[in-house]
């Protein structure tokens, strides 16, 4: 994997997910738009007729479970043993340990491939899309969600800038946050973009413990503990002043057909 931002991402992700399995789920399951989470939004993209579904980079399995329906097989694949152990302790599955860049599935064997966050975490994106396209049946669907930069409100920008100035960085990912030449990449793998949507989710912080939970779940490969503490204290102060503070989580959902 390329050293984006000078980070050895393979080593960083391995350590992060071994130490903090379920971190992504702790954030995304508390991110709300009305009453729904990003997981629910992604699950809604999957046709009721899809009976074999792969959840790529499933982590602790929140998305996998969201996809379960009577008569549907949902398989969760992840590279992290610790994430899968946590997934297994709950219900659902089957859970498969594997690399999304070399999927252990036959060509044209699945109705849908879904990923929450996989597209910004697994790199190179083009190889990931090639593998997803390979395992999809003709007419099959790829759907994924990823954090993005908009929509946000002026209030979101203020809080986000204050947190980022304490951290002296934004959260980082191995892959790009804003996909640009995406339609062309999909086409080169025999797929076409069907939908590209954005939604703003929000996480409400009520206490220092909430702030710690949220910031601990971010990929911050070059951030010292002192900077992390400063950002947590800023959020704690905002809670003290206003009773709560909202963090915006803009998300993008892309759906493609083979
Ligand atoms: C940000 S977490 C998202 C987890 C889950 N999809 C969710 O949204 O709750 C990213 C996940 O990608 C997994 N991952 C990273 N590289 C991978 C790869 N090459 N193949 C499969 N999984 C990978 C990590 O182990 C981690 O569980």
Image: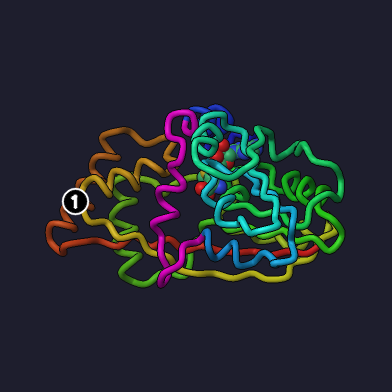
| Residue 174 percent across, percent down from the top left | 57, 42
Q: Position of residue 211 (x, y in %)?
A: 27, 48
> Does residue 205 appear left or right of residue 45 in this picture?
left
| Nearest the eye: 227 or 248 | 248
Q: Nearer the viewer, residue 257 or 112?
A: 112
Please tell me whether mark 1 sits on a helix, a strand or a loop: helix
User: Which residue appears at 61% of the width and 47% of the height?
Assistant: 118
Q: Is residue 156 magenta?
A: no
Instruction: Kindly identify which residue carries mark 1.
Output: 236
Q: In terms of depth relative to the viewer, which is nearer, 49 or 233?
A: 49
> Is residue 4 at least partly visible in the picture?
no
Give how far across and how far down residue 67 sits, in percent. Answer: 60, 57
Q: Quadrant of the N terminus?
A: top right
Side of 123 relative to 136 (left or right): left
Taking the spot 21% from the left edge, 61% from the top edge, the residue there is 244
Q: Which residues are magenta?
A: 16-38
- From this viewpoint, is residue 104 visible? yes
């Amino acid at each position: 994997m390329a050293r984006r931002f000078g980070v050895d991402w393979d080593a960083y992700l391995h350590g992060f997910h071994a130490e903090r399995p379920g971190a992504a789920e702790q954030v995304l399951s508390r991110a709300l738009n009305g009453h729904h989470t990003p997981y629910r939004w992604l699950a809604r993209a999957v046709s009721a007729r899809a009976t074999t579904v792969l959840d790529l980079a499933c982590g602790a399995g929140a998305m996998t479970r969201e996809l379960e329906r009577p008569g549907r097989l949902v398989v969760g694949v992840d590279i992290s043993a610790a994430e899968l152990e946590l997934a297994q302790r709950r219900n659902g599955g089957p859970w498969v340990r594997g690399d999304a860049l070399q999927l252990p599935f036959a060509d044209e064997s699945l109705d849908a491939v879904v990923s929450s966050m996989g597209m910004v975490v697994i790199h190179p994106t083009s190889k990931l899309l090639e593998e997803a396209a390979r395992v999809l049946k003709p007419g099959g669907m790829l759907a994924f969600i990823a954090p993005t930069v908009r929509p946000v409100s002026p209030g979101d920008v203020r809080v986000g800038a204050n947190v980022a100035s304490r951290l002296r960085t934004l959260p980082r990912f191995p892959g790009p946050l804003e996909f640009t030449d995406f339609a062309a990449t999909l086409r080169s793998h025999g797929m076409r973009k069907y939908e590209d949507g954005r939604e703003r989710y929000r996480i409400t912080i009520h206490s220092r413990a909430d702030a710690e939970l949220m910031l601990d779940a971010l990929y911050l490969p070059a951030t010292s503990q002192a900077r992390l503490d400063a950002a947590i204290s800023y959020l704690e102060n905002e809670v003290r002043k206003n009773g709560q503070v909202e963090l915006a989580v803009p998300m993008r959902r892309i759906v493609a057909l083979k």
